[in-house]
């Protein structure tokens, strides 16, 4: 069985987020927002992401457009 190793992790420390222990998916990590993690705290919230949608916009059929 093989494992995954981050190229930015050296001796357990993250080189991208200096002074922090490597924690895949943490803010600043190259994986943050790119993958879905089992821990929901590491997942980007849909309302905060770059492709967030405005849920108050009604579909054309409800706006009287067809």
Image (cartoon, rainbow, N blue to C red):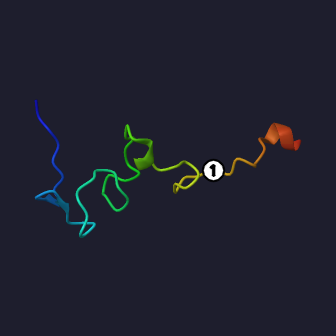
> 62 or 49, which lies in front?
49
For the question of whether residue 25 can be seen, the reply is yes
Q: Image check: 54 left or right of 24?
A: right
Q: Residue furthest top?
A: 1
Q: Image check: 16 left or right of 32?
A: left
Query: Residue 49, how many percent across, how many down?
Result: 52, 54
Residue at position x 84%, y 39% in the image: 62
> What kind of element bears circle 1?
loop
For the question of whether residue 65 can be seen, the reply is no
In this rendering, the count of numbered labels is 1
Query: Residue 53, how many percent across, how many down?
Result: 63, 50
> 7 or 66, which lies in front?
7
- Give the quadrant of the N terminus: top left
Q: Image check: 59 left or right of 24?
A: right
Q: Residue furthest right?
A: 64
The residue pinned by badge 1 equals 53
Which of the 4 image quadrants contains residue 9?
bottom left
């Amino acid at each position: 069985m093989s494992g995954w190793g981050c190229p930015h992790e050296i001796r357990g420390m993250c080189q991208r987020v200096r002074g922090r222990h490597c924690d895949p998916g943490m803010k600043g990590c190259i994986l943050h927002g790119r993958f879905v993690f089992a821990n929901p705290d590491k997942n980007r919230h849909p309302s905060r992401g770059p492709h967030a949608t405005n849920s108050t916009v009604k579909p054309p059929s409800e706006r009287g457009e067809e």
